[in-house]
Each structure stands twice: as C-alpha cells, then as structure tokens.
Amino acid sequence: MRKRQFLKQVGLLGTASLMGGIDLAVTAPKKSPVAAFALPSLPYGYEALEPSIDKLTMQVHHDKHHQAYTDKLNAAIAGTKYEGMRIEHILKTISANESEIRNHGGGYYNHALFWKWLTPNGGGKPSGKLADAIAAQFGSFEAFQEKFGEAAAKRFGSGWAWLVADAKGKLFITSTPNQDNPLMGFAEAQGTPILGLDVWEHAYYLKYQNKRADYIAAFWQVVNWPEAARQYSTVR
Ligand code: MN3
C-alpha cells in the first residue's frame, strides 16, 4: 500500500513537471489532516417544529444522537480508505459487515437529510415534477401518503421509511432497519432518498410514547416539500 501511494505521488510529480514551470517543492503532496465530518446545524430552532415535534426531542435528537453518530463515524473511518471520501460514496461502498460505518455513517447521513426534510412552514403537498411523479406512480398524493405511512408504521423496531427514486426517476417506497438507507448496496432496494422519516423511538417517544401513528400524522404537517423536490431534481 505504501509503495503504491509512493508511486502515485511520483506520478503526480511527473505530471506537474510536464505542465511546466511549477515549483515541485510547492506542489508536492503534503500529508494534510483530512477534514472530519461535522454535525450539521439545525436550519431552525429546536422549538420551531412545535407542536408536531417537541423542543426537547429535537434537542436530544440533534445534539446527542446525531452528534454521537458523527463522532463515531469519524472514529470508525480514521486511518482507513474511507477517510476523506464523500459520505454518499462511503455508504455505497461499504459491505454489510462493516457495522461501525454502516450504523454511524448511516446515522450521520440520514439525520443530515432528515433535518432538511422538516420545516416550520411545511406541510401541504408537493408541486411540479415531484407531484407529477407521485401521481403517476401512486395514483394520487393521498394514496402515496397512505402507503408511506404504512411503511413507517410497519417497520418493526428502529428504522426509517423512505420515498426513493431509482436512476430513471421512478419513485418507490421502502423501509430500512436501524440506520440503513437506500444508498447501501445491501439494502432491499437502492436509489436516491427523496424523503425519509425516522421511526426510531428516540424521534418521538418523549411526546408520543407508543403512539407512532400520531407521530407519523404530525410529520405531514412539517414536511419540507420544496427540499424533497430539490432532491428529486438531482436524479435526472
Ligand atoms: Mn434519529
């Protein structure tokens, strides 16, 4: 491995000298520290999603749970081939038995998306291409909501419900256990997450206790449809 890296560096130096006039002492690759993943800040206040999602849940969920996933992901990739890789690439690359990165990398990524999929001015229905695709695939927005809610309600134990787009932009609904997501090659179905709902008890237990169905109903009041549409626009 060391030797391959060395040859790679020699190769880079060779290219640089061919480009002409570049000071090799300056362009020679340096061993610089790789930036670790950082906890993304919430795009709104902890209390902003009240009464759908309560302040204390948001505080603990973001500051404690998401922070822990972030820290443990950084610890798991330190010194490995994954260091410096984009998170999407890491999740697409790992195998099912790389459980530290699977759990904490999934947790880091899923929550980073989740905060953006919620907004105090949310709710309603999507518009534009995403609305058309939902109607084409599920018959109506209401039929989609029902099917998505069912996936969220039926996920046994901890996990996520997802609206996903395949490479051709075709939508489907799936759910994953724990912190898995549809980027992972070993997930039941692969694609780009367009909307996701965290159904771990830590996401709703303080306010809703065992009533996951009430939490799912409240989720629709704070969904950030423009963000889901933006995510969908990256697919095709
Ligand atoms: Mn969570």
Image (cartoon, rainbow, N blue to C red):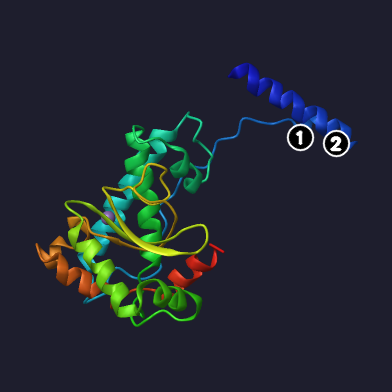
Q: Are marks 1 and 2 in contact (CB under 8 Å)?
A: yes
Q: Which mark is residue 67?
A: none
Given residues 16 and 195, the one toward you in this image is 195
Out of 94 and 39, give the one closest to the viewer.
94
Q: Secondary structure at mark 2?
A: loop
Q: In the drawing, does residue 157 fall left or right of residue 234?
A: left
Residue 114 lies, in percent from the top left, at 36, 62
Query: Going by the picture, which residue comes out furthest to the left?
Result: 210
Is 199 on the left or on the right of 180, as rendered? left
Q: Residue at x 26, y 47 (%)?
A: 178
Query: Which of the 4 image quadrants contains residue 200?
Result: bottom left
Residue at 40% x, 77% y is 135
Q: Give the labeled residue for mark 2.
A: 22
The disc labelled 1 sits on which kind of residue?
Thr
Ligand 1 shows up in the quarter that is: bottom left
Image spot of residue 2 (x, y percent) = 60, 18
Q: Is residue 227 left or right of residue 174?
A: right
Q: Is mark 2 within 8 Å of ligand 1?
A: no
As displayed, is residue 84 above or below residue 5?
below
How packed mark 1 is, by other alpha carbons closer than 10 Å (few <14, some 14-19, many 20 or more), is few
Disc sitting over residue 27 in the figure: 1
Query: How many badges with numbers are in the image?
Result: 2
Q: Quadrant of residue 131?
A: bottom left
State the quadrant of the N terminus.
top right
Q: Is residue 109 above or below residue 213?
A: above
User: How much space separates mark 1 and mark 2, taking CA atoms?
Assistant: 7 Å
Q: How far from the left and from the top, in percent, is residue 94?
A: 43, 37
Determine whether 21 is above or below 180 in the image. Answer: above
Residue 108 in sight from this viewpoint: yes
**Mark nearer the N terminus (1 vs 2):** 2
